[in-house]
Image (cartoon, rainbow, N blue to C red):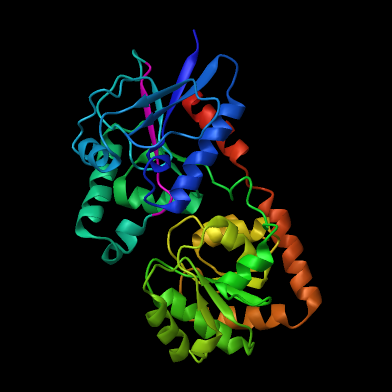
Amino acid sequence: MSVLLRVVLDQLITETDPDLAVASAELARALVQTAPSGCDVGAIVPTGRELDIAGLSEVRRLGMGRRELAAAWQLGVTAGVGGGLIHSPTLLAPLTRHDRVNEHDQTVVTLWDLLPWQHPEELSRSALAWHKGMLRRARKHADAIVVPTHAMVDRLEELAGLGSRTRVIAGAAATGFAVPTDSVGRRRTLAVPEAVIALVGDASPSAALSTGFSAIAASGTDLPVVVLDAQQGQEPAIVDLAEASGISGTRVRVRPEADSADRAAILDASVLLVAPSRRAAFPWRVLEAMKLSVPVIAVASPDHREVIVDGGAVVGDPQDGEEDAAALGEAIAQALGSGRSLDRLGVLAGDRGRAFSWHEAADRVWQLHADL
């Protein structure tokens, strides 16, 4: 009798977050490729377009769209889902009472960030209520909660008191993330010059983004700055932040929601990537930069320290962010001071980037369910 692990793949039907969609697809493919003997992978999805995941032995399509499914599961209405082993790459899962001991039912969810609790002002009231409600359900009914860093475990414990149910399984850059063959043309279309500093933004113009601009200004460089991860309509506010920090608005390029190929093309032209945020979130752009051997300079948040380790310059006081701009600026100036420094940081980034893979993540997911 084979064991079926069913993965919730709502993001591949109706995408609400590009990074969650990539993580869901990558994990599902890796689970298929790493399935132990006698184990199969299935999917649980809302209604919508077809899945593009080869090797699934079963796809259970529920009779509602993603929005309706999210509302129903928030209320504990999970009719039609069935039991068995269920793994969700996000917080969306059929979290109800089940019998793990006698019926061998398991439900595991994943949290990639704690932004709804750390920065609730950036979410709508309905989205905030959904996240908080689903975490409460996870606290009651999840057999394990996966987070990407050990640093996030402590903060999640303060929020939900999950004890030994928390597991750490890191993500990775997309398997096929690489510089596209048409990178020069893409940069021309995006109006991105051939030598830039990539700056990781946030969901909204924030103190972290201001810190990044101030650091770049303090470094003395006149390189153009490309802001990644901004949202549509934020360019005027971001340019204002840059100018308030001493950087001319003409040097700033804001590229909202650039797809993976565009990001790879931008990173290909990046002299370095600056990550100024202390948010409790998995640093997807840092992983992508390291995969392409782009030098990384990041503020010393707990998550950055754990993910980057010696793969870049992690600077500042982890307990005090008041001097972040000065520390980042000094590190940027030092990196740009010689080609040798940049080359060294690039080699370190590439070496560290190879430590992350979706195959390893899938192996650990299989082991987690076996341990349960």
Percent coordinates x, y for residue 231 in the rendering = 40, 67
Q: Is residue 343 above or below residue 365?
A: below
Which picture quadrant has residue 300?
bottom right
Which picture quadrant has residue 182?
bottom right
Q: Is residue 121 visible?
A: yes
The quadrant of the picture occupied by the C terminus is top left
Percent coordinates x, y for residue 356 in the rendering = 63, 47
**Residue drawn where x is 30% and y is 24% of the image:** 81
Which picture quadrant has residue 340?
bottom right
* Left or right: residue 153 compared with residue 193: left
**Residue drawn where x is 54% and y is 46% of the image:** 171
* Left or right: residue 242 compared with residue 99: right
Percent coordinates x, y for residue 163 in the rendering = 37, 40
Nearest the viewer among 321 and 259 is 259
Q: How many marks?
A: 0
Report the magenta residues as a range.
Answer: 104-113
Q: Is residue 294 above or below residue 152?
A: below
**Residue drawn where x is 41% and y is 54% of the image:** 113
* Left or right: residue 236 compared with residue 77: right
